[in-house]
Amino acid sequence: MYEWSDEHKMLQTVVRDFVEREIKPKVEELEHGDLPPYDILRKMFTTFGMDAMARATFAKRIEKEKAALAEGAQPTPVTEDVESIAGMDAGFTLIPIVEMCRYCPGMVTAMGVSMGLTSAAIMSKGTIAQKERWALDLLTLDKIGAWAITEPGSGSDAFGSMRSTARRDGDEYVLNGSKTFITNGPYADTIVFICKLDEGNDPKDRKVLSFVLDSGMAGLEQSKPLRKMGMHSSPTGELFLTDVRVGRDRLIGETEDVSSGGREGAKATFMMERSGVAAMALGIIEQCLMLCVDYAKNREQFGQPIGEFQLIQLKLAKMEVARMNCQNLVFRTIEMSKAGRSMTLAEASAMKLYSAGAAVECALEAVQLFGGNGYMAEFQVEQLARDAKVLQIYGGTDEIQTSQIARSLLA
């Protein structure tokens, strides 16, 4: 694949129109945290029939899994890629991400964590009953999801430094711990809580388990949105669990078997998150380039448009190279999905490492090209520069991506 198909271009046009009509005028409210993004996202789902497609795809998948169980076979696990979750050509999932990131990357993060990461954790490892109970509402955005792994003392060492615990108490589990930097945390209806099984053993030897929680459960506290550098349209918060009692029906897969969830499930979710960053980066880069080209043509200094200066031309040329590279990474994602192939964790890490760096570099160069105007909030490049930075941090920092790629090469 080397260019968007006619069908893809048609979708680009209608999604771009929706974004400029429904999102662009509300960016100021979203940026200041006065407007949670969820109603706008739901309107987009309804407008383009994404909710109806999700329901139809979900029904087919569940019917197939039930038939397999009736025949005594195990259902084929759901792979955590954009096509399997949305049930369509991956391009039709990625294009809205690209277009939304031109104005409001935070909304993509909020949407992706809810209908992507949280639902994928349940769809990939959960029982049929758990999928029917929680996953469908997440896939349609009828409910908002949060995927809770990061803790105040963990960060990149998500598993090694994990202190949140599950302790058996009869037929139930008692959950304790805290999570931070949780996307959708303040407003989430459904939370996938990742913790370690405390059997009195050394924390480093404990099994990692995942539980599904509902907001309002006794002992569960969701903080107000945290203030942060960028991605203001993506509410981020903390979670506090104090003796939250849950039944085995909330343990994903209803088993403590490590291969059915825990570390492997979390790693698969990381892979999905990382591969989606290229589409986010592409949207940011495209918008920065468009704004810079227009500014270079119309901004005059020393008696001529600044686009006539070679140093400005160099900045524009490098942005175009980055745009082409990120677009090709998105094309590769689509082609692999069509071929039924999922990326390895190292491949997804390489994609994230490059595209996140390219987005940050282009956004900062856009600020530089705009000069003093670029540092002012009324010029969009200021927001895009703040929003881009987190791509090098969440879903695994640049340093973690580098380590993952190198380990794969040396294995």
Image (cartoon, grey):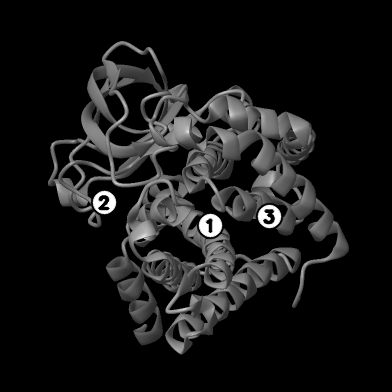
**Outermost residue to the right:** 6
Amino acid carrying label 1: it is Met
Q: At which x and y percent is residue 387?
A: 40, 52
Q: CA distance from mark 1 to mark 2?
A: 24 Å
Circle 1/circle 2 CB separation < 8 Å: no
Q: Is residue 267 left or right of residue 165?
A: right
Which residue is found at the position 51% from the left and 83% from the top?
A: 313
Q: Nearer the viewer, mark 1 or mark 2?
A: 1
Q: Nearer the viewer, mark 2 or mark 3?
A: 3
Amino acid carrying label 3: it is Ile
Crowding near the residue tagged with mark 1, few <14, some 14–19, many ≥20 C-alpha atoms within 10 Å: many
Q: Is residue 397 left or right of residue 65?
A: left
Q: At which x and y percent is residue 407?
A: 34, 78
Amino acid carrying label 2: it is Ala
Which residue in the protein does label 3 denote? Answer: 95
Q: Quadrant of the C terminus?
A: bottom left
